[in-house]
Amino acid sequence: MYLYNVTVKIDPEKHDDWLHWMQSVHIPDVMKTGLFEQYRLCKLLEQDESGGITYAVQYLFNNMADYFTYQQQFAPHFQQQHAERYRNHFVAFRTLLRIVAESG
């Protein structure tokens, strides 16, 4: 299994709107592509939040073909939506991981 992680630091003044939009619009739209098995929305703890509040959005998938399909057919649109809505109020970076072991 694989994990596509998007780490976002959002300005405190936009935080509440961003969190609501992520949970009610963005993540459900990403999941509707049918390319991911599940997701996690995680808030980083023990961080200095004066410059922003940091979250990791993790999407789990089974094969690289699904990831490449997502990157080619869907990611540009979703990333543009996010960038336009929160312009100059966030920083983000993305990582791709292969899960080597997990419990249960």
Image (cartoon, helix red, strand yellow):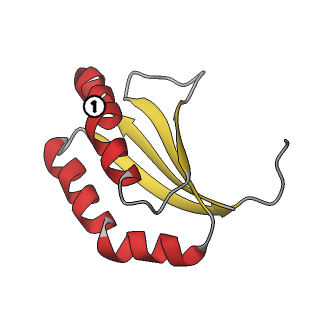
The residue sitting at 33% across, 28% down in the picture is 19
Residue toward you, 81 or 35: 35
Q: Which quadrant of the view contains residue 4?
A: bottom right
Residue 46 pos. (x, y %): 60, 21
Q: Which quadrant of the view contains residue 26?
A: top left
Residue toward you, 71 or 66: 66
Q: Is residue 17 above or below residue 97?
A: above
Dot 1 lies on which element? helix
Disc 1 marks a residue whose amino acid type is: Trp
Q: Which quadrant of the view contains residue 87?
A: top left
The residue sitting at 46% across, 63% down in the picture is 35
Residue 48 pos. (x, y %): 50, 23
Q: Quick check: 3 left or right of 94?
A: right
Residue 80 pos. (x, y %): 20, 58
Task: For the N terminus, give its image quadrant.
Answer: bottom right
Q: Is residue 41 above or below residue 26?
A: above
* Residue located beneath label 1 in the image: 18
Dot 1 crowding, Cα within 10 Å, few <14, some 14–19, many 20+:
many
